[in-house]
Image (cartoon, rainbow, N blue to C red):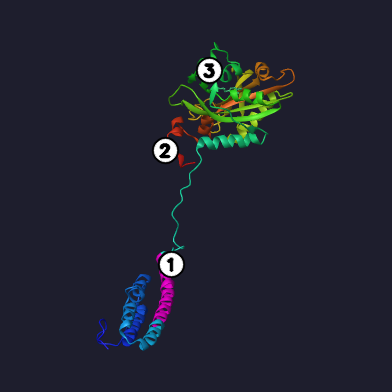
Amino acid sequence: MEPLLFYRHMSIHAAIEEKGRSALNQIEVSSDLEALDAVRVSVLGKKGSLSEALKQLGQVPPEERPKLGALANEWKAKIETAIEARKEILAAAQIEADLIRTRVDVTLPSRKIHLGSLHPITRTIRKVSDTLGRLGFDVTTGPEVETDFMNFEAVNIPKDHPARDMQDTFFLGPGVVLRSQTSPVQMRTMREKKWPVRILCPGAVYRCDSDATHSPMFHQIEGLWVDKKVSMSDLKGVLDFFAKELFGSHVKIRLRPSYFPFVEPGAEVDVSCALCAGRNPHCQVCKGTGWLEILGAGMVHPRLFELAGYDPSEISGFAFGMGVERIAMLLHDIPDLRLMFQGDQRFLKQF
Ligand code: DAH
């Protein structure tokens, strides 16, 4: 028999056994799946040690070959089984290690969640809506981009009417304005549905005006109640309830005759000063007058009913409109209107 090229000092038998045992050893000590696979390739791969040993089979006498072939297969199977077993152990260890590495300590305090708060304007709109909602007022809305007709003519402010000057309007185009008041929603609502009507309309309004007490965008809430036999005393009852709910049961209201084109008669409505009730001539809130103006109101002008397609002889109604910022300032003692539009966290956090 010629000396072996590859395993010069051992018989092929011994070489297979030696390679097999060494492989089992390596498998046993492989520390991760990658290392284990490297062992597999180095032993069972095309150029692996066991395969190389088998290639020498051609050099042994034919009668020896089946025995050696069987031995090689036996080792191959042993090694494969050992690899599978090791693989299971390593995979489990890997999972275990991953779990430890990514473990979350659920007892740690959580990161602080910063919840926002409601803007005083939103709070005030909700408070007014909730309060009057208990008297059956439904909240409705209308467009902020309004027709000149709806903003003015439809609520009885004709083209040449001086009241137009009271409301410096932003014109967007011919016949189109940014609404300067929520009153057009009265007309929109009445044109859309038959009476009885009992609605509130909160929303933004725009006027070309800006200083310490005026903002070019501010908010109003419009109220409208139309039904058979609605009277001025209903209006007073609603407003009295409203003022007491908002500012405290000790406040009173007072109506002063005033003029708004969409009502007749019209009134400006004051609440008694919740702070001094008129007893402090130097009161910061009411400036010593004892009264604070909160809204405009009146009995719906018959002209509006006609324009809406209602029969003024059948029904009557009252309307009111208030500035939300003004109410918010009174409710929360806010000294400057501009604070509401600056988005300063130190201010907003207080609500
Ligand atoms: N629209 C008026 C304004 O912007 C407020 C107002 C006054 C509304 C009297 C009304 C009302 O509905 O009856 O100044």
In the picture of the structure, the residue carrying the numbered disc 1 is 99
Q: Residue under circle 3?
A: 175
What is the number of the mark on residue 344? Answer: 2
Name the amino acid type tagged 3: Gly
* Residue 214 picture location, percent across and down: 46, 25
Residue 160 falls inside the magenta stretch: no
Residue at image location 59% in from the left, 23% down from the top:
184
Q: CB of mark 2 within 8 Å of CB of mark 3?
A: no
Q: Residues within 10 Å of mark 2 (few under 14, many from 20)?
A: few
Of residues 79 and 270, which is closer to you in this image? 79
Q: Report the magenta stretch's main SS.
A: helix
In-front residue for pair 11/45: 11
Q: Can residue 267 be seen in the rendering of this structure?
A: yes
- Rounded to the nearest angstrom, the CA distance separating label 2 from label 3 is 37 Å
Sequence-wise, the earlier of marks 2 and 1 is: 1
86 within the magenta span: yes
Q: Amino acid at mark 2?
A: Asp
